[in-house]
Structure formats: C-alpha cells, structure tokens
Image (cartoon, rainbow, N blue to C red):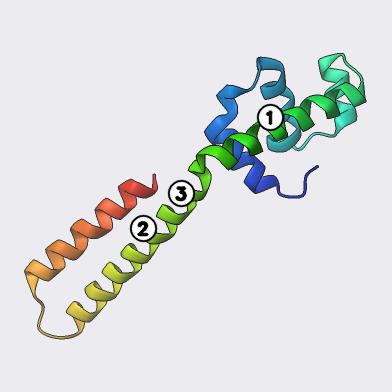
Amino acid sequence: MKSDTFHMSMLFDFYGELLTDKQRELFDLYYNEDMSLTEISEIAGITRQGVRDAIVRAESILRDTEDRLQLVRRYSGIQTQVDQIAQAARLIVSANASGPRNYEIAKQADLILQTAAKLSE
C-alpha cells in the first residue's frame, strides 16, 4: 500500500475533504504519521483488516478523483515551471552583477524572484 507515499500524501492534500472523517483519520495515521495497520487498529478500535479496507477505499477515491481532475499533475507541472523561471531570474541577476550593473534589470529580476517565491508557497 505504501508504494508511493509522497504521491498519496499529495492526493490527500488536494482531495482529502472528499473522504469520510474516518477514512481521513485512518489515511492520515497511515501515510502522514507512518503508523502500522496494527497500531491504527488499536487506536481506532477496529480490526487490522477494517483499517486496511478503509485505507484502500480512500486511496481508490483519491486516485479516481485525480484521474478525472488532474489537479496534482497540473500543480506539479506548474511548480516545475515556476522553479525554471526562478532559476532563469537568478542567472540574469548573476550575469547583471558581473558587468556594468543595470538597475532596471536587477529590479525586474528581483520582482520575478519574489513572484516565483509567492507562487511556490
């Protein structure tokens, strides 16, 4: 079940509100708190198999929702592009600093870096 913990955590962050309270709780304990099925079953007062079934159902809901909406995929692509923009702005800053400094270029590159940082939050 934990083959791609990061991906499942991303799906949970985007679509977790679609799960029932119980599914959300069990999923969070399993993926985010890294608890075993046995530990969770003791806390939740249900069988280990019941915990596993709830987590598998939650995973299915999250995957199906992502298959339809593609929000996590789009977010990852946008984040990669924002990182590329920020890297390009850093190169401009560096190139601008090595010769006669153009203050307008420095100002605009700084604005790009600030905007990229805000988008990454």
Question: What amino acid is at disc 3?
Answer: Arg
**Which residue in the protein does label 3 denote?**
74
Front in this rendered view, residue 32 or 27: 27
First reached walking from the N terminus: tag 2 or tag 1: 1
Element at badge 3? Answer: helix
Front in this rendered view, residue 60 or 35: 60
Instruction: Establish if 102 lies above or below 115.
Output: below
**Which residue in the protein does label 2 denote?**
82
**Residue 33 visible from this viewpoint:** no
Q: Callout 3: 10 Å neighbours few (<14), some, many (20+)?
A: few
Front in this rendered view, residue 102 or 19: 19
Quadrant housing residue 79: bottom left
Quadrant assignment for the C terminus: top left
Quadrant housing residue 112: bottom left
**Residue 98 visible from this viewpoint:** yes
> Mark 2 or mark 3: which is in front?
3
**Which residue in the protein does label 1 denote?**
28
First reached walking from the N terminus: tag 2 or tag 3: 3
Element at badge 2? Answer: helix
